[in-house]
Image: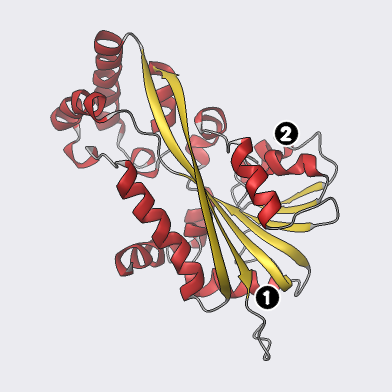
């Protein structure tokens, strides 16, 4: 638990301007290749957090609007904060059909707090970018009494272990440091830690968690595009990336017919605001 929390604190303490622009080189690829949140998962979230047409939601770090477009058809008011300028423009495009969505090009840290304004604070694969010391208290203060914090996660897509073993040989030749496999048990452990952090903050209670496992097929092109959206690959030098991607492409085309069967866990954590006698904003 401490290891994950410390990791989050470490990269949430990175210069804010650097964090704002981190995904810029991969924004288009992220919009194209990252998986969506399953409707089954969204339906559970809407029911548990009692979201309705009348709800007012603050979304923290909406990216290109991946989760936003899944919830916007409900008709509720959604204010989205997105610090990255490229994501901001993509979110504007993706959310154009929804007049109930407003997107602001700012970070949660810099956003001017509106106390007790929202029924829910939503963060989809984004809350780990914010320091726990800032994120949980500010989210709680933005919520009405008994409002909900909703954390959505799409864990990294994984091939079967047998397929991974073939891909691993390519990594061992070119970039051994990126040769990493997370099985379902490991990913579920990480998700439990992320959920527990909300409760450990002292600002939220009554954690409810759930998950859906999805199976998808990605072509070699789609898979390599997906990889470019993960942080270790964003910072990978071109002279390392090019031979690695060439080797992976050959492996996928020669050994697996040009596509990969992948699975991923989509998960939610929903916790209710602890009502404090002393307001701390």
* Residue name at image x 84 percent, y 50 percent: 53
Q: Please name whichever residue, 46 or 117, is drawn nearer the observer in this view of the structure.
A: 46
* Residue name at image x 54 percent, y 36 percent: 27
Q: Picture coordinates of residue 78 (x, y %)? A: 76, 52
Element under disc 2:
helix
Residue 118 drawn above or below residue 233: below
Circle 1 or circle 2, nearest the eye:
1
Dot 1 alpha-carbon crowd within 10 angstroms: few under 14, some 14 to 19, many 20 or more: many
In the rendered view, does 162 fall on the left or right side of 55? Answer: left
Element under disc 1:
helix
* Residue name at image x 64 percent, y 56 percent: 122
In the rendered view, does 154 fall on the left or right side of 171? Answer: right
Identify the residue under disc 2: 93
- To which quarter of the image does residue 69 belong? top right
- To which quarter of the image does residue 71 belong? top right
Identify the residue under disc 1: 141
Upstream in sequence: badge 1 or badge 2: 2
Instruction: Give the quarter of the figure containing the C terminus.
Output: bottom right
Instruction: Give the quarter of the figure containing the N terminus.
Output: bottom left
Q: Picture coordinates of residue 54 (x, y %)? A: 86, 55
Q: Picture coordinates of residue 192 (x, y %)? A: 41, 58
Q: Is residue 105 visible?
A: no
Q: Picture coordinates of residue 210 (x, y %)? A: 52, 51
């Amino acid at each position: 638990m401490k290891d994950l929390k410390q990791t989050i604190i470490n990269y949430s303490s990175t210069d804010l301007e650097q964090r704002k622009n981190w995904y810029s080189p991969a924004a288009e690829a992220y919009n194209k290749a990252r998986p969506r949140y399953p409707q089954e998962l969204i339906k559970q979230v809407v029911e548990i957090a009692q979201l309705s047409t009348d709800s007012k939601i603050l979304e923290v770090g909406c990216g290109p609007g991946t989760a936003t477009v899944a919830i916007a058809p409900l008709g509720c008011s959604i204010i989205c904060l997105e610090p990255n300028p490229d994501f901001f423009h993509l979110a504007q495009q993706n959310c154009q059909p929804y007049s109930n969505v407003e997107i602001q090009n700012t970070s949660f840290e810099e956003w001017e707090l509106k106390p007790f304004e929202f029924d829910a604070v939503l963060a989809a694969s984004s809350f780990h970018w914010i320091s726990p010391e800032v994120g949980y208290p500010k989210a709680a203060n933005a919520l009405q009494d008994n409002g909900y914090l909703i954390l959505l996660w799409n864990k990294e897509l994984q091939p079967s272990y047998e397929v991974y073993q073939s891909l691993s040989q390519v990594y061992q030749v070119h970039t051994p440091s990126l040769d990493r496999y997370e099985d379902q048990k490991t990913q579920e452990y990480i998700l439990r830690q992320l959920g527990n952090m909300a409760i450990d903050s002292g600002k939220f209670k009554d954690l409810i968690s759930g998950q859906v496992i999805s199976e998808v097929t990605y072509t070699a092109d789609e898979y390599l595009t997906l990889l470019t959206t993960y942080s270790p690959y964003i910072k990978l030098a071109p002279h390392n990336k090019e031979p690695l991607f060439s080797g992976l492409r050959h492996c996928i085309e020669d050994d697996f017919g040009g596509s990969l069967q992948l699975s991923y866990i989509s998960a939610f954590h929903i916790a209710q605001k602890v009502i404090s006698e002393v307001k701390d904003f």
